Structures are given as structure tokens and as C-alpha cells.
Image (tube, rainbow, N blue to C red):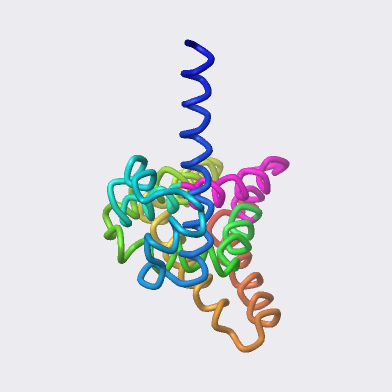
């Protein structure tokens, strides 16, 4: 009986994973509006009933994809900052990792373009707050704590300002005629900004 239960649980997990992987690819390629649940069901090779067993509707499926995308962006940031020697270096490395992740067309489409409009700003910010923005907030707080008290700024306000700037930078880089040149300019500007805000000497 236990083996049967485990087998059923594994089957459900495999079906959910297939739905998420297929939906992620379609949402990335076609956008939320262009990807239909019938396409997801057909390409994942599952029944419509299986889709609605795991997800109430298309929006719920998309929200799960956004959650997974947010986790991947956070994982990239954490991997990049693991070897940082101080809070400022962590912010530098984490900011670059975020921009690199968002330069992926799929991540940009799902996370920066469709998620805020489909899920609403409040829900998108809640997800982002537990992932990329949450990591940025922790980095800003650590870097501010390393400064003399007279140089410290409110971490929450600064987190939102930096997050907004980097989100816009990621969208701008995606449309740049010369991405390499635009990225170089963005990198130099971001490093200068972080140094002005957080450098201790």
C-alpha cells in the first residue's frame, strides 16, 4: 500500500513538473497572453483534468511559474555573492548577477514584463520581496551597517530605489541596439553608484 501511495505521489510530482516546464517555455516564447492552456496540455502530453488537478486556472499556473523563476534568479544571486569578502562586494556581485539573469529573454518576459501586470503589483512585489528584492534588502542593510552612522540612509527606501533602477536597466539593456556597449555603460554606472552610497573609505 505504501509503495502504491509513493508511486501515485511520484506520478503527481512528475505531472506537475512537466506542466511547469512546458508552461515556462511557452510563457517565455509567447508571453502570457499568447500561451493558452490547451497548448500547455498538448505539449506536456497530459490531460486537461491533470492541469486543473494541480492548478485552478491559467493564472494560477503562471503564478507558479513566476515563483519558480524568482527562485532561479535568487539562486543566481546567491551563487554570485557566496565568495564576497564584504557587503559592498556582495552588492556589486549580486547586482550583476541579477542583471545577467534578467537578460535571459524568458526571465525578462515572465518576471519583469508579464508578472506585474498579470498578478498585480502587490502580488508581484510579495514574490519579489521573498526572492531578489529580499536579497537586495539584506545586502543594503549589511552595507549600511558597515558605514558610520552619519552616512547611513534608510535601507527600505534605498532598496526600492535600487531595485527600480535595476529593473529598468534590465529592460533597457534588452532593447539596446548595442547590448555589449550598453551593458558596459550600465556596469560602470552601477559600480559608481554603489561606491558613492556604500564605500567606507
Percent across and percent down for residue 7 are 53, 24
Q: Main secondary structure of the magenta part?
A: helix
Count the numbered circles shown: 0
- Taking the magenta stretch, the answer to whether it contains residue 127 is no
Percent across and percent down for residue 164 are 42, 65
Report the front residue among 60 and 123: 60
Q: Is residue 140 above or below residue 183?
A: above
> Is residue 192 left or right of 32 when viewed as pictured?
right
Report the front residue among 37 and 100: 37
Report the front residue among 119 and 154: 119
- Give the extent of the magenta segment: 68-92
Residue 142 visible in the snapshot: yes
Q: Quadrant of residue 177?
A: bottom right
Q: Is residue 140 above or below residue 40?
A: above
> Is residue 62 left or right of 56 when viewed as pictured?
right
Query: Which residue sits at x=66%, y=54%?
Result: 93
Report the front residue among 94 and 128: 128
Q: Is residue 4 above or below residue 35?
A: above
Residue 155 visible in the snapshot: no
> Is residue 187 left or right of 44 when viewed as pictured?
right
Q: Quadrant of residue 192?
A: bottom right
Query: Which residue sits at x=33%, y=40%?
Result: 53
- Taking the magenta stretch, the answer to whether it contains residue 91 is yes
> Is residue 199 left or right of 117 when viewed as pictured?
right
The residue lying furthest to the bottom in this view is: 177
Amino acid at each position: 500500500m505504501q509503495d502504491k501511495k509513493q508511486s501515485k505521489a511520484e506520478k503527481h510530482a512528475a505531472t506537475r513538473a512537466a506542466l511547469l516546464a512546458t508552461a515556462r517555455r511557452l510563457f517565455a516564447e509567447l508571453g502570457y497572453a499568447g500561451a493558452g492552456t490547451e497548448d500547455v496540455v498538448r505539449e506536456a502530453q497530459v490531460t486537461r483534468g491533470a492541469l486543473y488537478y494541480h492548478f485552478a486556472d491559467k493564472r494560477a499556473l503562471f503564478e507558479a511559474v513566476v515563483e519558480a523563476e524568482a527562485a532561479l534568479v535568487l539562486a543566481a544571486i546567491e551563487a554570485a555573492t557566496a565568495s564576497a569578502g564584504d557587503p559592498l562586494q556582495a552588492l556589486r556581485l549580486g547586482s550583476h548577477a541579477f542583471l545577467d539573469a534578467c537578460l535571459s529573454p524568458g526571465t525578462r518576459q515572465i518576471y519583469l514584463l508579464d508578472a506585474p501586470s498579470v498578478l498585480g503589483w502587490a502580488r508581484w512585489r510579495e514574490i519579489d520581496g521573498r526572492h531578489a528584492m529580499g536579497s537586495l534588502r539584506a545586502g543594503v542593510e549589511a552595507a549600511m551597517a558597515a558605514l558610520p552612522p552619519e552616512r547611513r540612509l534608510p535601507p527600505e527606501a534605498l532598496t526600492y530605489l535600487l531595485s527600480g533602477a535595476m529593473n529598468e536597466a534590465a529592460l533597457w539593456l534588452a532593447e539596446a541596439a548595442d547590448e555589449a556597449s550598453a551593458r558596459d555603460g550600465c556596469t560602470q554606472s552601477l559600480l559608481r553608484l554603489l561606491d558613492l552610497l556604500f564605500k567606507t573609505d
